[in-house]
Image (cartoon, rainbow, N blue to C red):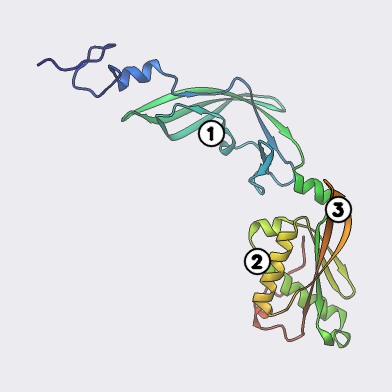
């Protein structure tokens, strides 16, 4: 009985797909390709990347990195990428030309492919950074002392609220922290402004769980959008002087920062 053979190279004893062995198929197939012109949009303030209409990866480097390059490649559906090594061959202020050496697996065989990529970097302020620079906010958390606050000196009150806020920040999720636009120091405490109301409510809930305080919420109308009223939310948190062991464990030199 004759063995099946590759119609391209004539080899026998190899797995075939449509009469062609994996080696010949790899030679005749574009395993990895790059777009003719690629653009990566980066927020110069927080490093977020614009993907479609959304901003992602806040807190990343404001410079182009390897993490930006791999998603630009067009990979054959039967290819698994093992590793990519990039080498810059030329660059201008906004455009970088690179060559990528791609270690991959295709139909059970290991291959190395080369791909050339030209990437233009654009800088735009992301939605959150634009809002922060414009002093935009949707919610504010008021950090205040307890009923005995009139007997507590201002310096002691602010130092105590510093420690409490630092504890809350440290235990908050990254997306809650990124929603903090700015913080204002007042004689009676601090006001912390947020660009996302859900993040402010989440931090207030954390304060309730952590310190046993009950947030007092109020809302005020500040505009309309798409025919609907838009409200700004205020969450007042009052911390009695005996604010529990949590604040004592906070860093004694911490400061309130947005």
Residue 118 vs residue 73, the one in the foreground: 73
Q: Report how far apart the C-alphas of labels 2 and 1 lie in the structure.
A: 33 Å
Of the numbered discs in the image, which one, if any, rests on residue 70?
A: 1
Does any portion of residue 66 appear in the rendered image?
A: yes
Does any portion of residue 253 appear in the rendered image?
A: no
Residue 199 vs residue 46, the one in the foreground: 199
Of the numbered discs in the image, which one, if any, rests on residue 170?
A: 2
**Residue at the spot of label 3:** 135
Labels 3 and 1 touching (C-beta < 8 A): no
Q: Position of residue 254 (x, y in %)?
A: 73, 70
Does dot 3 land on a helix, a strand or a loop?
loop
Q: Report how far apart the C-alphas of labels 2 and 3 lie in the structure.
A: 24 Å
Residue visible at 80% across and 61% down in the picture:
139
Q: Is residue 130 above or below residue 26?
A: below
Location of the C terminus (image quadrant): bottom right
Q: Position of residue 36 (x, y in %)?
A: 60, 19
Q: Is residue 252 above or below residue 47?
A: below
Q: Report how far apart the C-alphas of labels 3 and 1 lie in the structure.
A: 36 Å
């Amino acid at each position: 009985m004759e063995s099946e053979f590759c119609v391209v190279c004539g080899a026998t004893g190899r797995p075939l797909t449509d009469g062609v062995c994996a080696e010949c198929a790899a030679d005749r197939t574009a395993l990895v390709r790059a777009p003719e012109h690629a653009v990566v949009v980066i927020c110069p303030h927080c490093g977020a990347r614009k993907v479609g209409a959304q901003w992602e990866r806040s807190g990343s480097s404001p410079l182009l990195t390897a993490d930006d390059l791999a998603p630009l490649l067009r990979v054959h559906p039967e290819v698994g990428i093992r590793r990519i090594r990039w080498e810059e061959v030329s660059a201008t202020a906004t455009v970088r030309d690179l060559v990528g050496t791609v270690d991959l697996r295709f139909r059970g065989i290991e291959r190395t492919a080369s791909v050339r990529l030209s990437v233009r970097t654009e800088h735009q302020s992301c939605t959150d950074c634009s809002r922060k620079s414009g002093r935009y906010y949707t919610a504010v958390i008021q950090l205040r002392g307890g009923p005995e606050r009139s007997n507590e000196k201002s310096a002691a009150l602010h130092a105590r609220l510093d420690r409490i806020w630092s504890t809350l920040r440290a235990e908050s999720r990254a997306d809650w922290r990124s929603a903090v636009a700015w913080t204002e120091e007042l004689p009676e405490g601090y006001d912390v402004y947020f660009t996302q109301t859900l993040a402010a409510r989440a931090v207030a809930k954390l304060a309730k769980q952590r310190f046993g305080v009950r947030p007092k919420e109020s809302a005020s109308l500040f505009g309309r959008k798409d025919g609907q009223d838009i409200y700004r939310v205020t969450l007042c948190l009052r911390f009695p002087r005996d604010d529990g062991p949590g604040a004592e464990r906070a860093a004694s030199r911490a400061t309130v920062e947005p």
